[in-house]
Amino acid sequence: MSEEKLYAVRNDGGQWADPGYTFGSGAWVTPDKAEREEDAKHHGGHVVAFVEEPEKVEVSKSVGDAIDSLISAETYVQAAEAFKYLFASRKKEDIKRIMKAVRNGYTVKEKKYRVLTPKSWWASENEPEYMHMNVLNGIENYKGADDDTLFTQKQLDLYGLSGSPFTKEEVTDDEQ
């Protein structure tokens, strides 16, 4: 995230100053705060700083629910339970990621699945094959379990992979 800020002049009516210092819906922004302060002093209004919105962190549904519980907790016990779930027995990088999610906001990552093909499709009895997305050929079976073998529930439904004869395996956060 860039630390550079942009500044504009806005009047009390919520209108922005344009390059001709007429106030309306268009804003004239510059990185020079002192220049905008001088403009506001001479033409009215006040200086408004624009900053880049921080990138949201992707978290699992359970972590997202715990963050919501922590933020909306009404008692110490509720806050302590959410805090304990979020931070007890976690690695340092996980704690930093969760703190960033609390500070900057988060999105909930969709559950991902691998689709195991029927054993009769396997080239070798000991090497399972998964369905995967091939850019040229579409959906096909494939040895191994790479990133292109991950599907959301919506994709499984769209491609007809959620039912028989396929076996759906949920992928944990560690595997993604």
Image: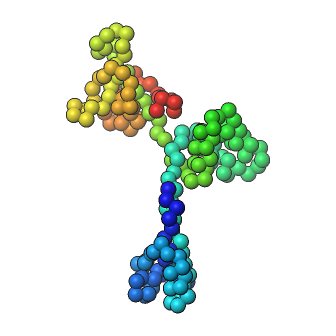
Residue found at the far left of this picture: 136
Residue found at the far top of this picture: 125
Residue found at the far right of this picture: 76
| Horizontal arrangement in the rendering, residue 32 relative to residue 75 (left or right) | left
Q: Residue placed at 55% from the left, 82% from the top?
A: 37
Q: Residue placed at 48% from the left, 81% from the top?
A: 15
| Horizontal arrangement in the rendering, residue 145 relative to residue 42 (left or right) | left
Count up the numbered dots: 0
Residue 23: name its quadrant: bottom left
Q: Which of 158 and 69 is in front in this view?
A: 69
Q: Where is residue 28 in the image (x, y as percent from the top left)?
A: 43, 78
User: In the picture shown, does residue 27 fall above or below 144?
Assistant: below
Q: Residue placed at 69% from the left, 35% from the top?
A: 88
Is residue 65 in sight in this rendering? Answer: no
Q: Residue placed at 73% from the left, 51% from the top?
A: 74
Q: How is the image coloured?
A: rainbow
Residue found at the far bottom of this picture: 42
Q: Position of residue 52 (x, y in %)?
A: 49, 62
User: In the picture shown, does residue 175 fall above or below 65?
Assistant: above
Q: Where is residue 101 in the image (x, y as percent from the top left)?
A: 58, 48
User: In the picture shown, does residue 34 fall above or below 129?
Assistant: below
Q: Which of 51 and 142 is in front in this view?
A: 51
Is residue 105 in sight in this rendering? Answer: yes
Residue 134: name its quadrant: top left
